[in-house]
Amino acid sequence: MHPAPPPGPQPPGEGASADLLARVPKLLEAMRSVGSGLELHSTLNRICETAADLANARYAAIGVRDEDGDGLADFVHHGLDEATVRRIGHLPDGRKGLLGALIRDPQPLLLTDLAEEPRACGFPENHPPMRSFLGVPIRVQGEIFGNLYLTDKHAGEPFDGHDLAMVRVLATEAGIAIGNARLYEAAQQRERWIDGSVAVTTALLSGGDTDDALQAVAEQARRLSGAAAGIVLLPADGGGLEIVAVAAEHRTQALGKVIPPDNGIVAELLAGRPVFVDDAATDPRLDTGPVRAYGPIMLLPLSREGRVLGGLVMPRARGERPFTRTERALGDQFASQAALALMMADAQRDRERLAVYEDRDRIARDLHDLVIQRLFATGMMLESVQRAAAVPEVRDGVGGAVDELDVTIQEIRSAIFALQQPTEAPTGLRTRLLREITMAAVPLGFTPAHRFTGPVDTAVDEATGKNLIAALRETLSNAFRHAHATRIEVSVDATATLPDGRPGVRLTVADDGVGIPEGGRRSGLHNLERRAETVGGASRTGPGIGAGGAGTTVWWEAPY
């Protein structure tokens, strides 16, 4: 091993060679090249390529030290083709061998032969043989960023002190370039998270569908964190947290699943504490299951002013780097902003719900105080006419009309009773479905026709029932907001047989509206499909019940 000379090219009077002087213009060009960009990863690649060219090295790499200082967060290399990289497999983590030694003691190092260095161990299978070695630390604003490694000169001779001096000057310039790139990347990263927070707030406060808004939260969380999935959790009725929105590259059946309250991580989130997992496959706090297929996971509480509204989960793929302190801080700010938007959206929905309740009370009073009284008075008038009528046919016709009025009065009284029922009372599935239909009557201006077949209350399980109610709410909302329907027919059949032969429940909602326009939004239909898939079912659409098939019919079905 050669001792490391002082930094910088040595002055001519102290033995500088003509070769060293000849390489000074090349060094200046290399320094210019290193500082020519702002994107961090491309800057690291450019430093590797420039350093290898400057020292005439076959291979070059930069090991980026992790935040704890005991390993590598990133490893950028030059000189290895893609086939060799694939054969090597996992890149070094810097926790052992020569790279680990340089992380713990970041000093310039020259080695003539790696085979004679006891610390140069742990090379993976299929790694190309390497002999000579040169390593220098890279400092950014006085702190160690990582190390620059060079191996094997093309001519076969070992690296010398002039090579080391040149590379140390380049490493100094590289530290400046990396510092600028990190500042630029941090600014860009903050800007992306801020834009994502604005998008989430807009989605939650737009007054649109709640499921769409929660899906927007999941999608933004996944995109901003570079995760494999974004998952939104909200408190479940029976305790624990329910998965209410999932954004992932592939379809998943996790939507609607409830994580029990005795789960350690759920307890942490409900207590308002974030949880960070470095490797889901080995963390004892995680249950066995699909989550074990992920790597690092960031779990953040959706909390505001001491109130926990739910949780936000961002898992990265197996083998991906853990979340940095900056990413954790930005994620926490994003979750806090999303929680604030959720609170504001809840308050907005409470105001809208209160307006609906007040409207229902007004309708009930009007029906009772005005409509029923008039119908009753009309019935008494008709009874008087019936008694005075001399023609039997007239008496019979008036009697039939009086009977119809009595039936109408009873139906109106039933409607008044339904309007005055407290929504908090525990009820069966049929009653909850009727409540959704009744609630939809206010914005629609009419009550959808409805029919129930089979043991709806007893046959359909709770998970399928909750998704069935959500599907009915979604379809009625679409009919009001988009279809402009004047007639809607709802059918719930608990005796249905699914295409694969299983018994199930089928929801059919048909309208006579404008139908589904070409190129229109499909988020509502996608929500229906996702909910059906989570319980093993399916959803599809077809022609409506208007003239010539105008409108839309939605079929939503699931096994029970």
Image (cartoon, helix red, strand yellow):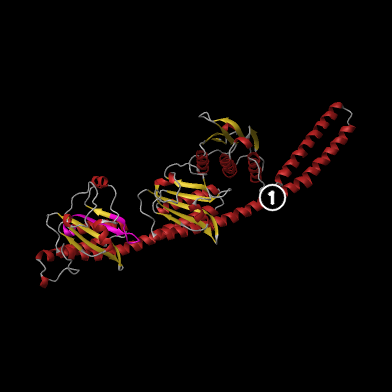
For residue 497, which quarter of the picture? Answer: top right
List the single residue furthest toward the bottom.
Answer: 13
Q: Position of residue 482 (x, y in %)?
A: 56, 43
From this view, report whether residue 245 is shown above or below residue 385: below
From this view, report whether residue 409 is shown above or below residue 222: above
Q: Is residue 58 magenta?
A: yes
Foreground of the two, 225 or 517 = 225
Task: Kindly identify the amino acid type of the residue bearing the numbered disc 1.
Answer: Asp
Left or right: 281 as drawn, with respect to 426:
left
Residue 123 visible within the image: yes
Q: Position of residue 395 (x, y in %)?
A: 85, 29
Q: Residues within 10 Å of mark 1 (few under 14, many from 20)?
A: some
From this view, report whether residue 15 is shown above or below residue 468: below
Query: Residues in magenta?
Result: 53-75
Q: Position of residue 439 (x, y in %)?
A: 65, 45
Mark 1 — residue?
359
For residue 373, which quarter of the picture? Answer: top right
For the N terminus, the image quarter is: bottom left
Left or right: 125 as drawn, with respect to 192:
left
